[in-house]
Amino acid sequence: MKRFIGFIKKEFYHIFRDRRTLFILFGMPIVQIMLFGFAITNEINNVDIAILDKSKDVTTQEIINKISSSKYFSIKQIIENETEIEAVFKKGKVKAVLVFEKAFSKKLIKENNATVQIITDATDPNTANNITNFVSSILLKYQQEINKDLKIPYQIVPETRMVYNQELKSVFMFVPGVMTIILMLVSAMMTSISITKEKELGTMEILLVSPLKPFQVIIGKVVPYIFLSIINAVVIILLSIFIFKMPVQGSLFLLGAESVLFIINALSLGILISTVSETQQTAMMISLMGLLLPVILLSGFIFPISSMPNILQVISNVIPATWYIIILKGIMLKGVGLTFLWKETLILLGMTVLFIALSIKKYKIRLE
Amino acid sequence: MEIINVIKAKNLTKKFGDFTAVDAITFEVKKGEIFGFLGANGAGKTTAMKMLIGISIPTSGEASVAGFDVYKNPDDIKKNIGYMSQKFALYDDLTVKENITFYGGIYGLSRERIKEKRCQLVEELGLQNVVNELVSSLPLGWKQKLAFSVALLHEPKIIFLDEPTGGVDPITRRQFWEMIYKAANGGTTVFVTTHYMDEAEYCDRVSIMVDGKIEALDTPKNLKEQFKAETMNDVFLILARG
């Protein structure tokens, strides 16, 4: 045990004396969560739009007021004729232009319909779609207001409610993802790098010749990273609770336990990577390409799994992060417990056991 | 009972697939001896040594180190040997003191013992001024001496040195051999691989490996007589050319 403590102490010296490692360990989580929380967002908020009002009557004015008073849009420019539309888009000043046809009020009352054209800049299709939806819903609401007294014989009223994230805050979607990425990065990449570093320096050989058992060497290398990963997880959760007002509906204890499971899973992946790579660079490349990229692209963090082609859906199922993100969202947003997450937990556990078994096997082969 | 032959190998063989890296080598090393294990790069020196220090399992043959069987008791072997590789494996981002404490610790030395050994070692090597400096700031020669002393910290019966003088200048090499002699005089058996033939002259006995086999084994003097050569270098060239 005393040998073990000495070993861990040495590992902490390595970590705290290397600025790059320190930054990845403690700077990165904070930077990432802030970036995803504040800067990178797919919410519609104060989108600049332009208006071409060919009729300039009471009705159009009312609609324009409604739009400008919503928090989603701000009217940047009023244009006077159609030739200008192209120009404002090209300048990139606005994301959308609303065109009210001539004699809007009159047409509405006499012919019972009038048109508003919504032209959006679809270079960013997601935003364009959102803008269209938001404008349509404002128009719909206005229409209902002016038709208050009229009875339409048959009417289907869709009543929508967004549950678990009423305000559609994208940070709620990013926090579980960022947490997953960071735990993956710290646990898998940092351990695989630190183990291969010993191989490169030749110190691994010395350690293997010493009375320390190979598994003691590996556990000694891994334990500090378990601690640091746990600290990271706590920091991320605190940041998201206190800065982004993200709720944790479910049990904090379960959240912690599942996170430790995921950390161990990532660490065993890191060990596995270090058994197949001889240099730090290889370990880093394998971790980045083989772990980080799939986590970002295929785990359902950014792109929904259900809309992926079948083959990618299959791949996403074998990524541990996929299951951890489901668990995180379940506990934090839905407040569900193990009764609903036992399947995901079991899969994660199974993967962890598999990775540990594989690395032990690989390690033995190397020794022979 | 005192063991006279601290290393015994009989028909020790290591195969990697079809390739035979070490081909049925047989030799013995006496207690307190400086045994030179010579050969060109790729002759199988390092592979043979790895089997003796318990990080590689032999394909066939028998071997015992410090009285322990390499198959049955590799853990007992590890407690009784020291090892220094050509990379002088010290941790660059740890200080001299921390390196000593760490290596003493993994061999299970008590805190007092480590402190005692450290003071002794620092004084012998004249490292008083740099004891709290990072190892990365030391010149190569000092690192080499420190690595050697660290490998001897737990007072092993046998020390294995894998090309310990690679990349250092002749004067430092000379000083290093003085340290080896001192260790051998203290009763430690020294097993050293090298491809510097002048160093072979310093050994009590040498074996020369060619293509996985031991082609010659005797004192440098006898070998020179046997092959009618002036220097060990000539002996080696005669053997290597076949």
Image (spheres, grey):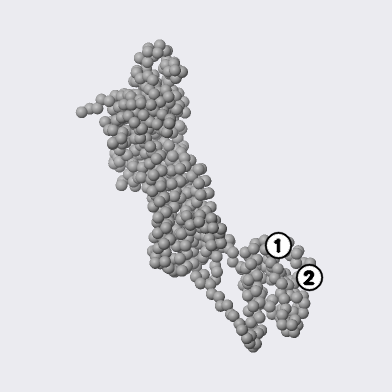
Question: Which kind of residue does numbered mark 2 sit on?
Answer: Asn
Chain to which the residue tagged by mark 2 belongs: A
- Marks 1/2: CA–CA distance: 18 Å
Q: Residues within 10 Å of mark 1 (few under 14, many from 20)?
A: few
Q: Position of residue B145 (x, y in %)?
A: 40, 31
Whether tag 1 and tag 2 are in contact, CB under 8 A, the answer is no
Callout 2: helix, strand or loop?
loop
Callout 1: helix, strand or loop?
loop
Residue ID at (39%, 40%): A365
**Residue A39 found in image quarter:** bottom right
Residue ID at (69%, 76%): A64
Question: Which kind of residue does numbered mark 1 sit on?
Answer: Gly
> Is A144 on the left-hand or right-hand side of A275?
right
Residue ID at (39%, 42%): A363
> Is B65 on the left-hand or right-hand side of A21?
left
Q: Earlier in the sequence, mark 1 or mark 2?
A: 2
**Between A33 and A308, which is closer to the camera in this rendering?**
A308
> Is B85 on the left-hand or right-hand side of A101?
left
Q: Position of residue A182 (x, y in %)?
A: 48, 55
Chain to which the residue tagged by mark 1 belongs: A
**Between B150 and A329, which is closer to the camera in this rendering?**
A329
Q: Which residue is mark 1?
A: A92
Q: Which residue is mark 2?
A: A81
